[in-house]
Amino acid sequence: MPRVIGRQTHNAPATNPEEYYRREGLYRCMSKSTIIEKTNDEVNLTDVDIIKEPVVDLGQVDPASHTESNIGQFYTVPEEISKRVLSYFFTKRFQSECQMTGSTSLMIRRPALEVLQHLKGLPQGASPPKFILYGGDGRGKSLSLVHVLHYCYSAGWFILPVPSVFNWVHGKSSLQVSTYNADRFDQPEEAAAWLQVCRSINSKFLTELKTSQQYNFGKRDSTGKGEPLGKVIDMGLRRANYATDAVGVLLKEIRNNPSLQVLYAVNEFNGFFLKTTFKDANQRWIRPKRLSLVHHFTELLHPHMAWNGEKRNQSSQISDLLGEKGLSAVQHSTNILVPCYSEEELDSCLWFFKKRGALTKGNVTEHLNSKVTKEVAFLSEYEPPIVSYLCRRC
């Protein structure tokens, strides 16, 4: 049965790190040159200041082996899994960090471990749990979701991925009236893109799983009972008009297969319940539920799933992020706050960047000392995006 995990964000991210840095009011007290460069006269290292390097890089390890003793440490995702399975959920900042460090390395943090512990301890036949990852913008909700995705994929689960709900409800894709329900609108381009992502992640399952009945596409095309589920995807990709219906068929088959362990992973989950930027022929705003993709995927919420929901406003409270309709869809969910870095996580982050050669200015290349970490802590207030920005400038 499916699980769902969702993530939520409360501010629109800045268009670049300096804008984010400036917006958060952190150009106070110190100039850029103070942040970027330190002369030998400014930093006098002593034996007390120099910190012994901790173990922060675990290399490639199975996410199933992660425990609380690993919190703050980094592990590396195999390149093949990173590109084919997880990359759809990567943020631009994380992509930049991967280029800077030369690998896809995730910090092991408590929110992701909490989800993994729930999933590992789930009794056979138990009702599938729901999780919502929430918190301030840029604090690691997407990467916590990626960590859970990696665990479930490695454990042999079927992944139902939704990398961005906002792309569906706020995108620029063309709409066409659904041939199945005249009150709904199809998004053929978005549906075809989703089918390709699903096929990339679940290629093994799509040859093994068989359709439970015949499905007709238009007047002439159909897939027969007992055919590989991948044939449904092929049908949706062959003709754009079939793509949205193919998505609905695939979700129906997965939902009705009791033998599967399924992770339903949604990024920007609360976009399902907000306003869209589309208008109908009468210039009235189209509600999200009238978009066929939103309809198909919100049907999965009854009664089983896990999300990553996001709403762009100044609140990070679940009730403000989801609204009344969203709250009704996530009853009995486990809400998990993704906070700023802790002191230990900040230290680990700096050591990891230093180990990978990402810190290149001044004495930082030779020593990472308490003065440097205190300055980064002061300037960033432990906010991950600002820590990343400072590290790229050090």
Image: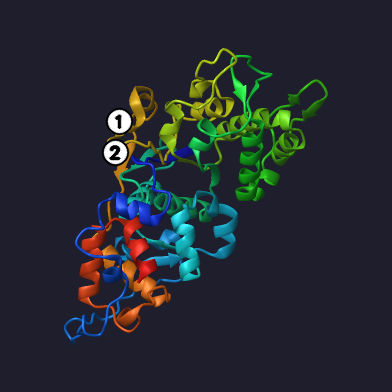
Q: Are marks 2 and 1 in contact (CB under 8 Å)?
A: yes
Residue at mark 1: 320
- The quarter of the displayed image where residue 367 is located: bottom left
Residue 271 location, x and y as percent?
A: 44, 32
Whole-angstrom CA distance, mark 2 to mark 1, is 7 Å
- The quarter of the displayed image where residue 311 is located: top left
Task: Tell me the element at label 2.
Answer: loop
**Residue at (49%, 28%) from the top-left corner?**
298
Residue at mark 2: 316
Q: Is residue 46 left or right of residue 366?
A: left
Q: Does 174 sit above or below residue 102?
A: above
Front residue (pair 145, 358) = 358
Residue 120 location, x and y as percent?
A: 40, 50
Task: Tell me the element at label 1.
Answer: helix
Task: Tell me the kind of residue under disc 2.
Answer: Ser
Find residue 73 and name its label.
Answer: none
**Residue at (66%, 18%) from the top-left corner?**
180
Q: Does 10 sit above or below residue 373?
A: above
- The quarter of the displayed image where residue 282 is located: top right
Residue 219 location, x and y as percent?
A: 80, 20
Task: Tell me the kind of residue under disc 1.
Answer: Asp
